Image: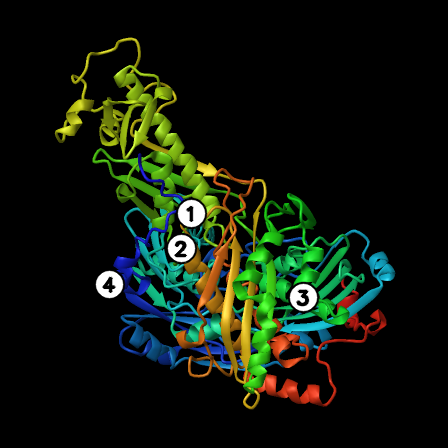
Amino acid sequence: MTTRMFGQKIKRREDPRLVTGNGRYLDDLANGSVAAAFVRSPHAHADIVDIDVTGAIDVEGVIAVWTHEDLPGQAADRLPMLIPHPSIVAPHTGFALAPDHVNFVGEPIVMVIARDRYIAEDAAGRIEIDYEFLDPIVGVEQSREGQRVVHAGMDDNVAAHYVQEVGDVDAGLDRAPHTLDLDLEFERSACMPMEGKGVIAAWNREDESLQVHSSTQTSTGLRAALAARLEIPLTRVEVITPDVGGAFGVKINHPWPEELAVACAARALGTTVKWTEDRREHFISSAHERAQTQNVKVGFDDDGRILSLDVKFWHDNGAYIPYGVIVPLNTSTHVMGPYNIANYRVEYWSLYTNTVMVTPYRGAGRAHAVFMMERTVDAIADELGMDRTQVRLNNFVREFPHPMGVTMQDGAEGCLDSGDFVTSLDKLKALVGWDEFEACRDQARAEGRKVGLGIGCYVESTGAGPYEGGHIEVESSGRVNVWTGLTTHGQAHATVFAQIVADALGVPIDTVHVATGDTRKLPYSVGTWGSRGAVMAGNALHLTAQKVKAKALKIVGESLEADPEDLEIVDGIISVKGDPSAAMPLAAVSVLSNPLRYAFDESAKAATQFAKESTAEEPSVKPGEQPGLEEQEFFSPLRSTVANGMHAAIVETDPETADITIRRYCVVHDCGPMINPMVVEGQVHGGVAQGVGGALYERMAYDTDGQLLNASFMDFLMPFASEIPHVETDHLETPSPLNPLGIKGAGEAGTIPTATTIASAIEDAEGFPIRAMPLDPSTLWELRNKHEAGEVPGLKSRGLDSAVSAPPSIAGHQ
């Protein structure tokens, strides 16, 4: 029997090619093409008075200089807002090239096309732009004051306002024996993939078609957007995603201004135009994430059971919202986490500022939600003098499925479909040594050291729809070709999808070859984001493989005069169960599946007209059938699955320098049955590394003029490998009832609870509340001084009357 591939720790099949330098990234392609460079605004808020391009036109090697007025037709309109949502009250998106106004430092204004990038950059430096400066709005506090506005014609800076409520929150707070009121804050950060954005557009004059290579997370979405904006038939546009050097959410937005502008230039010039983003461009003109100001009111009983939870938060969405408000929406729907909370209300305001726009970054708003909930649970435990794990146990959901009562980002009501939080917590406590930690603390104190133990629990909606597809073809050589519309940027698709197909089809994994991100083969797809790849495409390929298998068994049944129900496929050989003498390789089935007139090789002879006796009663290809051993299928779920997990960390804080060192980091993770535990481990480890960066190092520092002060790796701090702890893991596998494979997503899990887990550990070490992240040594030093002076940051008096209401311009916004 073939060894079952699902659940095996198979090494990533794509790694040998990538680690030996044989990857093909966007910048490796089209090196003989002409190149684009962009002139970007150096000011955060200004009117464009005049653009003088004469200095650039005189540069030898310059082919074209474009401003907004050169963009044709719909390409000159505002970029699309990809995900409309009822909460959006004032939709604003940017342009491919800004026409008369700029709203953040880095906004593109002019595109230069030249013989090569060096000439294009030199020419761009000669373009002179006159501005009339406007006062910028930077940060949540300035934006919600509403004294100035980012977009003319608005009365305030509110892009979106939304309220969801479950139960009766006010009554729950009124009857609660205890209440707390917390102010919390997440600062702005951003993902930093090794490869920035990039696009190559090639126009074919003969058939008026456009072929685009892009470092994108959604090749099909970009294809549709470019076809619409360039006003050309969708069938004349192809988008191919080569190897991608990381994405983490920043490449899900589409079309980026540069993608649209470069495509327009390629068509106008009838040639191939290439642009790749440099690192400074990525800092100042790609998407950021994270910044929120939060307020939590919670009512609870003597056992720490949460009776009512009232959450308000203000989200900085930057200058535009091309990807809608997925980040604050995800925050609002994930606050309750793994807890059974009967009364819950969440209200958010998403605010415009004169800074880089915000789109999803690994975890996409969920880290904010976990920070609110887990900081609140720790505060409850502190208030009651209870063990933090006991408060969690007293609040865990125990019966599944568990309706959440809130509408998720997929438009469906959220539901915890599976899990076992009690067992997960038991596993985590055993892994980190929770009950034995006090002895470790005592030993550290005796040595003059300060250590703390932290915890963070989370749930994550994964596998969002609306659909994903798969296409499988078996060649006459026995090679199995697999296509999915997803793009790949580190998820090991070539490995895990091959495992799924090998199992479902009954073939050796070495015969399975996976390709992704090419609209020429599979033009229908939604994209790679939100921990959905395995859930969506994995199940689509499982269903597709079953169709291919059924077709193969039918063909062999007719050939061997056997009932297909009596046949099986093992190691690519179809035989009668219990009688291997009556057998046929899948390669031969592929030959028979395609009736031929011509014998182009020896194997093809078996499918030609004279290879077998003619049957006059029916045609070679029967009605409803297609030639070839090839099928396509789609998977569309009722709602998202919900993965979950728990993290614990032991942190040491230096008594003198306030330096923060993570001594241990433990994870218990439940993504349902694991296709490849080694890949899941890698996703968790990588996610924790990103989470550590967001918790302790990474911060986008804007000044009051909207200038990003740390737009380089010299100033934007990221953790080295030496600063990432060894991650200890354990797993729980509770199958989801929402898909055939029972799987849930895993890609973002490591990042989501890391900041709150580290905050919990630092708080435990220091003995005072931690209410804002990221937290570096200098900030911790300041907090120590405030604590010694009697200040308690972020924790208000126990009554609810002390709550700070929103400014009038926002509080009254409906």
> Which residue in the protein does label 2 denote?
679
> Which residue in the protein does label 4 denote?
20
| Real-space Cα separation, disc 1 to disc 4, in angstroms | 26 Å
Numbered circle sitting on residue 675: 1
**Residue 205, percent from left and from top:** 29, 51
**Tag 2: residue type?**
Val
With respect to residue 615, does 183 lie above or below?
below
| Secondary structure category for the residue under label 2 | helix
**Residue 619, percent from left and from top:** 29, 15
| Real-space Cα separation, disc 2 to disc 4, in angstroms | 20 Å
Toward the viewer: 572 or 409? 572
> Which residue in the protein does label 3 denote?
388
| Real-space Cα separation, disc 3 to disc 4, in angstroms | 47 Å
Q: Could one spot residue 574 in this view of the protein?
A: yes
Dots 2, 3 in contact, CB < 8 A: no
Q: Which quadrant of the structure image shows residue 52? A: bottom left
Dots 1, 4 in contact, CB < 8 A: no
| Secondary structure category for the residue under label 4 | loop
Dots 1, 2 in contact, CB < 8 A: yes
Toward the viewer: 384 or 608? 384
Number of numbered callouts drawn: 4
- For label 3, count other residues whose C-alpha is less than 10 Å away and answer few (under 14), some (14-19) or many (20+): many
| Real-space Cα separation, disc 1 to disc 2, in angstroms | 8 Å
